[in-house]
Image: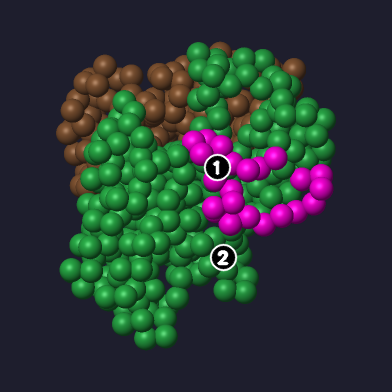
Chain colours: A brown, B green
Amino acid sequence: MPDIHLTVNGVPREGRCEPRKLLVDFLRENLELTGTHVGCEHGICGACTVLVNGEATRSCLMLAVQADGAEITTVEGLMRDGKLHPLQEAFREHHALQCGFCTPGMLLTALDLLRTNPSPSEDEVREGISAVLCRCTGYHGIVKAVLSAAAARSI
Amino acid sequence: MKPPKFDYHAPVTLDEAIALLVRYGGDAKLLAGGQSLVPLLNFRLARPAALIDLNRIKSLSYIREHDGQVRFGAMTRQRAIEFSPVVARRLPLLREATRWVGHLPIRSRGTIGGSIAHADPSAEYPAVLTALDGEVVARGPRGERTLAPRAFFETYLTTTLAPDEILTEVRLPAMPDGAGWAFEEFARRQGDFAIVGVAAAVWRASGRAAVRLATAGAGGTPRRLRESEEIVERDGLTDTAIEAAARRASELVEPDSDIHASADYRRHLAGVLTERALKRARGSARA
């Protein structure tokens, strides 16, 4: 079984798994980072989205071995100095989550969106977060949260 | 579900990758961005003996201008294309089409070569390749060959690539300065597979209109709409000519019915989207 060395949320980590193991399962099972959720396992729902070298990526469509040497950011890496990330604060403020299943993927997708487009229009936010399915909120609170984080220029 | 077992190889050179393909004699699959192949593995619809991962082959990732063309290494990410200044300047049609490919997190991994070699008829890049008369380069143990889209796409998910060949490069002619373009698509939700898409480009060549049109999702391969192009090249970019070209488009396509849409509906969409694409392309053209 191959050894995998990678950096997760700024911390060097390593593990060993079969080549067929998906990155999301490696994060959850080998590294015990269960904040990243497994939803559809075929790239549709977006719940497993993490940042790979800074770019939002479906961790169910990548093998763990492919992440050897990569820098990964998961939802566990968003807090700064014990405080919620400004985007997480905005999600709380605007009731952008209910059951919370999509939230990790939603946060990392929105973070990538705001880094590539710091002042998105509402339409652009809706297009951006269409990469993640939410079955509770109707998206309205999520759109408001992302727009307010963008307006605060806090990302 | 989870992928079945496979041997995994991550060669760092193209020659190693080709040698591996030869060794597995058709039982190996090439892994590019994985945005189509990994779902098939997770569903266990694909059970290859081996995966040959191309992601460590650095020489397959580039965007280069060469002799009036823009050349893309097959492993160039869709995301790199979306944000490339060269693509924005030389191939604005490709840039616009890229925004229709899945979602940004899909484009972070998805590659131009993977999309074209997968040959999903609803995919955007094969339609752009077809509209702009591009070509693909394939390399195998017998050497290299260059293929036009008509000689490459055979039918649904099927190309003329041999089992031991790798698509290594995609070449698109740069669009002339002042060219207009549009990629129109209809899908049920943002980021879904296209039900039908139309790629259009227009420019002036020797005082006349030059028109390029191709469809996605209206048959087993992307379809160049040469007869529609000819109507507009002959009569100019008038509303009447565009509407006639759109009617012809819905006659030219040979769509099939599936659970997403009937053949008749796809035919209808091919006409509607051709008209929209040509009118918007006309609006974005400069003299």
Which residue: 73% across, 49% down? B139
Q: Amino acid at mark 2?
A: Val
> Do the CB atoms of the residues marked 2 and 1 lie less than 8 Å apart?
no
Q: B61 or A91: which is nearer to us?
A: B61
Q: Which residue is mark 1?
A: B154
- Chain letter belonging to callout 1: B
Residue for point 45% across, 24% down: A42
Q: Is residue B46 magenta?
A: no
- Is residue B232 positioned above or below B36 on the image? below
Q: Are marks 2 and 1 on the same chain?
A: yes
Comes first in the chain, label 2 or label 1 = 2
Residue A13 image-quadrant placement: top right
Q: Is residue B180 visible?
A: no
Residue A133, given in percent of the width and then of the height, sits at 30, 27
Task: Give the extent of the magenta segment.
Answer: B140-162
Query: What quarter of the picture does the C terminus of chain B occupy?
Result: bottom left
Of all chains, the one bearing label 2 is: B
| Residue drawn at point x = 71 percent, y = 21 percent | B49
Q: Is residue B161 magenta?
A: yes
Cα–Cα gap, marks 2 and 1: 24 Å
Q: Is residue A76 left or right of residue B70?
A: left
Category of crowding for the residue at label 2, using alpha-carbon neighbours closer than 10 angstroms: few (below 14), some (14–19), many (at least 20):
many
> On the image, numbered disc 2 is attached to which residue?
B70
Q: Position of residue B153 (x, y in %)?
A: 54, 45
Q: Secondary structure at mark 1?
A: strand
Q: Amino acid at mark 1?
A: Glu
Q: Nearer the viewer, residue B259 or B249?
A: B249
From what the image shows, is residue B240 above or below residue B170? Answer: below
